[in-house]
Image (cartoon, grey):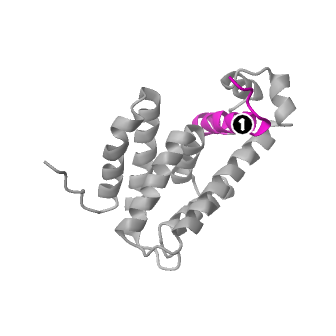
């Protein structure tokens, strides 16, 4: 098995740390907990990142970069069912690939007004990817989006933990689409 690259090691650290930040918050996550999660010594971890804040910043930067990529990918799609489905499918795959990062994104929905403004800004990018006009907020749409994507994240994380990603994939997509107000795709009999 080939030795992981520096960028692969950094990605693993960031994702594991993001999961811990999501669960415990920044203040209640220690460098030792992050090191333990990736099977490194604290010294080994500090070889890759100089501090806990640097790891958190890298996790936030990774989330922001992903949100910006999704927004760019969706910008030319008309608002509606196909754009929503594309966003749902991207979010599901992101959760499957980066469960820690996805867990941290659920903190956006929990963020209080005095929470991390970086998470709030990422949430606004996600709204834009879904075609939400921030100048004319539709409260029903906000509730549907929050319900759909929070539920998607929780369900997808459970699928990852249970090793049922393939088996749950279409069910998760259809549940999220239903929460967004779109009818289920008809099933062939």
| Displayed quadrant of residue 55 | top right
The residue at 69%/32% (across/down) is 29
Q: Please give the residue where the numbered disc 1 appears in the rendered image.
A: 8
- Asked if one can make out residue 143 in the rendered structure from this viewpoint, the answer is no
Q: Residue at x 35, y 67 (%)?
A: 81
Q: Is residue 161 magenta?
A: no
Q: Main secondary structure of the magenta part?
A: helix
Q: Nearer the viewer, residue 110 or 63?
A: 63
In the shown orientation, is residue 86 left or right of residue 67? left
**Image side of residue 4 versus residue 170, left or right:** right
Magenta-colored stretch includes residue 5 = yes
Residue at far left of view: 189
x, y (%) of residue 113? Answer: 60, 58
Give 74 or 188, whichever is nearer the viewer.
188
Q: Is residue 5 left or right of residue 114?
A: right
Q: Is residue 104 above or below residue 17?
A: below
Q: Is residue 105 above or below residue 40?
A: below
Horizontal and vertical percent for residue 37? 66, 25
In the picture, the quarter occupied by the N terminus is top right
Residue 101, image x, y percentages: 60, 43
Which contiguous range is marked in magenta?
1-25
- Identify the residue at image location x=51%, y=75%: 76
Residue closest to the eye, 3 or 145: 3
Secondary structure state at the residue bearing disc 1: helix
Residue at (46%, 33%) from the top-left corner?
160
Quick check: 105 above or below 182?
Answer: above
What percent of the width, then of the height, locates residue 100? Answer: 59, 38
Q: Residue furthest bottom?
A: 135
Res 26 visible: yes
């Amino acid at each position: 098995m080939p030795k992981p690259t520096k960028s692969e090691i950094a990605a693993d650290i960031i994702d594991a740390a993001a999961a811990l930040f999501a669960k415990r918050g920044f203040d209640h996550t220690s460098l030792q907990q992050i090191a333990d999660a990736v099977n490194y010594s604290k010294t080994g971890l500090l070889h890759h990142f100089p501090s806990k804040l640097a790891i958190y910043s890298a996790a936030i930067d990774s989330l922001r970069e992903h949100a910006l990529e999704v927004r760019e990918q969706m910008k030319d799609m008309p608002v509606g069912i196909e754009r929503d489905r594309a966003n749902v499918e991207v979010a599901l795959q992101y959760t499957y690939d980066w469960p820690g990062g996805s867990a941290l994104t659920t903190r956006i929905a929990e963020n209080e007004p005095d929470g991390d403004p970086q998470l709030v800004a990422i949430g606004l990018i996600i709204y834009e990817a879904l075609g939400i006009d921030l100048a004319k907020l539709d409260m029903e749409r906000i509730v549907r989006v929050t319900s759909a994507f929070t539920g998607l994240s929780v369900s997808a994380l459970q699928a990852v933990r249970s090793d049922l990603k393939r088996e749950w994939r279409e069910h998760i997509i259809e549940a999220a689409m239903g929460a967004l107000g779109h009818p289920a795709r008809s099933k062939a009999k």
